[in-house]
Amino acid sequence: DTEVTQTPKHLVMGMTNKKSLKCEQHMGHRAMYWYKQKAKKPPELMFVYSYEKLSINESVPSRFSPECPNSSLLNLHLHALQPEDSALYLCASSLTQGTPGYEQYFGPGTRLTVT
Amino acid sequence: TQLLEQSPQFLSIQEGENLTVYCNSSSVFSSLQWYRQEPGEGPVLLVTVVTGGEVKKLKRLTFQFGDARKDSSLHITAAQPGDTGLYLCAGDHTDKLIFGTGTRLQVFP
């Protein structure tokens, strides 16, 4: 099973709302990732968790707050977003972080629209 | 900042044609992955290449990693409409993947 699940599939939120994106994997992977993808562009890395600890934060604004409650779950808490934050948010996981040849498996994404 | 440039950016071909997508960088990568992404979905891993000069085949798709591990190519033989999508290469560099600029392929019946 190489499945990464994400909920919700679609999300529309106002600039004053607080919402959360969820990601789950049951492959025993110890590294999990959040990416942001704008239309017709490649994914951009936002955060990396390794063994449930934040390993990389790519200078993401504080209105995005990641959380890794356990090795299978990854959340992205959203607050006071801007319209330019509208994008496809992708979660991925891999066996470990930083091992040559490690493979990342992506979820289907959450399409976020900020109004 | 490491950059992975893909060419061409766009490719529109008829079913049955062959094509090659290139992924180039000035940086060395310990491995390189190829993904295909359909609209509104997440990227799906196609292959990982690790050794310089390595060639891997996946049905009609042939992937090659450059000898110096700075570049890669994807060749599709007898393209089919089901091959349509965004093809992304991604290099493994210092604990994260660096994604290429992408190649959007459209195969018409």
Image (tube, rainbow, N blue to C red):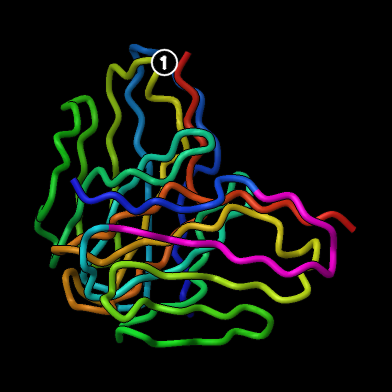
The x and y percentages for residue A25 are 37, 67
Quick check: A88 left or right of A46?
right
Q: Nearer the viewer, residue A79 or B58?
A: B58
Badge count: 1
Residue beneath the point at 29% across and 41% down? A76
The subunit letter for the residue under badge 1 reads A
Q: Could you tell me which secondary element the residue under label 1 belongs to? A: helix
Farthest residue toward the right?
B109
Quarter of image, res A62 = top left
Under mark 1, the amino acid is Pro
Q: Nearer the viewer, residue A71 or B60?
A: B60
The x and y percentages for residue A107 are 46, 58
Residue beneath the point at 38% across and 80% down? B49
Magenta-colored stretch includes residue B20: yes
| Disc 1 crowd, CA 10 A, few/some/many (<14, 14-19, 20+) | some
* Residue A95 in the image: above or below residue B99: below
Magenta-colored stretch includes residue A17: no
* Residue B93 in the image: above or below residue A20: below
Residue beneath the point at 39% across and 53% down? B100
The part of the chain drawn in magenta is B11-25
Residue beneath the point at 54% across and 70% down? B74
What secondary structure is the magenta-colored segment mainly?
strand
Q: Which residue is mark 1?
A: A83
